[in-house]
């Protein structure tokens, strides 16, 4: 099983400065590369202070320039917010500039506050995503593509330059609903998912859906991989663990506000924390916040479930020094227990 660090920008205090925040994220990427993580991942979001990365492909190029081997995943780019005729060229350029280390995770968008203000209401995001994905796939794999659809209509054109890798970088589909995971897997896509604050059974439902889809593809699906994201942190003692759990609870009290079904109350870019239905005790059971030895035990079922890559979201409120220590400790005391090369590494070649 492989591991990735999610460079998820959490920005609760605007006085900290976006420049300082992104320097922190770059420092985390450099350390992740040095200590042996398989990948780092970037999440596209606009207008809000959680997962705040409006330019993931630009940052991917910056990271590639500062690192040597780590893969750089988008987790994810929100396709309905982009014009595929422009975005396809940006993807090709970014793949070239990152020396082929880019892995393109794509999704429909999950925050109505963001989507509506950028002109793509959440109720049309699914159908626009589906057409955008078809257009992007065609533009990356064929020359002289024309289109006549609901959201795209254009005469024949060829994206230049052509991809350095046939069809462009590996594409990963971001889906959370088990049935959707099954259908996307059957279409031949790598999968990125997360149970968010959900319990272990929800995670098992997601992994089972991927397994079923992959098995039904037979040999055509052998290369497909499942990456799963979890809030995680190495705690030094019970007091530290409780403090990190409380920080994660506060993080989710903001995340839930803007996620689908939330009211979307945002004050000058800062998401307002709201009361949560889930107890802090139940949340603690769902997250990977524990000592290194406990982390090894908690990750065992992830291997058994067939997860190829765990994406660790360590940015939910801890300071930079603590976060760097967490990344270092995880690499030294946890990763050696899962050192066998998995399908996730092979699929990105």
Image (cartoon, rainbow, N blue to C red):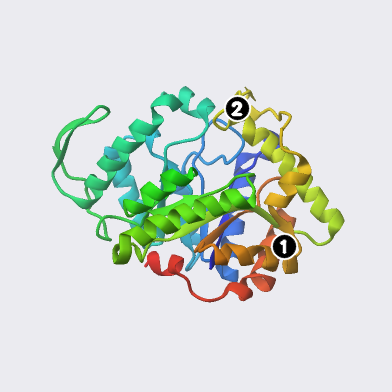
Could you say where residue 347 lies in the image, as x and y percent from the top left?
39, 65
How many neighbours does mark 2 have within 10 angstroms: few (below 14), some (14-19), or many (20 or more)?
some
In screen coordinates, is 164 left or right of 282? left
Q: Residue 288 versus residue 84: which sits nearer the camera?
A: 288
- Which residue is found at the position 27% from the left and 60% from the top? 164
Q: Disc 2 designates what residue?
A: 262
Could you say where residue 9 lies in the image, as x and y percent from the top left?
60, 44
In screen coordinates, is 28 left or right of 138? right
Element at label 2: loop
Q: Residue 338 versus residue 286: which sits nearer the camera?
A: 286
Q: Is residue 291 above or below residue 23?
A: below
Q: Disc 1 designates what residue?
A: 325
**Quadrant location of the C terminus?**
bottom left
- Which residue is found at the position 68% from the left and 46% from the top? 316
Element at label 1: helix
Residue 118 seen in the current view: no
Cα distance between the residues tagged 1 and 2: 34 Å
Could you say where residue 200 lies in the image, as x and y percent from the top left?
63, 52
Residue placed furthest toward the right: 239
How many neighbours does mark 1 have within 10 angstroms: few (below 14), some (14-19), or many (20 or more)?
some
Q: How many marks?
A: 2
- Which residue is found at the position 43% from the left and 48% from the top? 181
Q: Quadrant of residue 10?
A: top right
First-in-chain label (1 vs 2): 2
Could you say where residue 33 lies in the image, as x and y percent from the top left?
55, 66
In screen coordinates, is 24 left or right of 102? right
Q: Which mark is residue 3?
A: none
Q: Residue 344 versus residue 203: which sits nearer the camera?
A: 203
Q: Nearer the viewer, mark 1 or mark 2?
A: 2
Q: Is residue 113 above or below residue 40?
A: above
- Which residue is found at the position 51% from the left and 27% from the top? 112
Q: Residue 257 versus residue 96: which sits nearer the camera?
A: 257
């Amino acid at each position: 099983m492989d591991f990735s660090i999610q460079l998820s920008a959490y920005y609760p205090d605007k006085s900290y400065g976006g420049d300082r925040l992104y320097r922190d994220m770059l420092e985390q990427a450099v350390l992740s590369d040095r200590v042996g993580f398989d990948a780092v991942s970037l999440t596209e979001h606009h207008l809000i202070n959680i997962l705040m990365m409006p330019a993931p492909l630009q940052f991917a190029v910056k990271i590639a320039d500062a690192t040597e081997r780590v893969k750089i995943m988008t987790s994810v780019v929100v396709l309905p917010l982009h014009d595929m005729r422009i975005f396809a060229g940006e993807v090709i350029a970014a793949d070239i500039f990152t020396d082929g280390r880019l892995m393109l995770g794509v999704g429909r968008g999950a925050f109505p506050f963001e989507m509506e203000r950028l002109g793509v209401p959440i109720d049309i995001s699914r159908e626009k995503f589906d057409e955008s994905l078809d257009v992007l796939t065609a533009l990356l794999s064929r020359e002289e593509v024309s289109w006549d659809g609901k959201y795209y209509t254009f005469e024949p054109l060829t994206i230049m330059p052509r991809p350095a890798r046939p069809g462009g970088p590996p594409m990963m589909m971001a889906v959370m609903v088990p049935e959707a995971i099954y259908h996307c897997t059957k279409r031949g896509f790598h999968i990125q998912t997360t149970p968010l604050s959900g319990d272990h059974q929800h995670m098992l439902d997601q992994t089972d859906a991927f397994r079923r889809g992959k098995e039904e593809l037979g040999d055509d699906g052998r290369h497909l991989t499942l990456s799963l994201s979890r809030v995680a942190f190495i705690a030094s003692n019970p007091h530290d663990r409780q403090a990190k759990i409380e920080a994660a609870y506060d993080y989710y009290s903001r995340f839930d506000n803007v996620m689908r079904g939330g009211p979307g109350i945002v004050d000058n870019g800062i998401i307002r924390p709201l009361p949560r239905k889930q107890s802090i005790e139940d949340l603690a059971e769902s997250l990977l916040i524990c000592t290194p030895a406990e982390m090894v035990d908690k990750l065992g079922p992830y291997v058994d479930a067939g997860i190829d890559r765990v994406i660790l979201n360590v940015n939910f409120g801890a300071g930079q020094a603590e976060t760097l220590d967490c990344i270092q400790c995880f690499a030294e005391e946890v990763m050696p227990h899962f050192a066998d090369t998995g399908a996730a590494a092979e699929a990105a070649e």
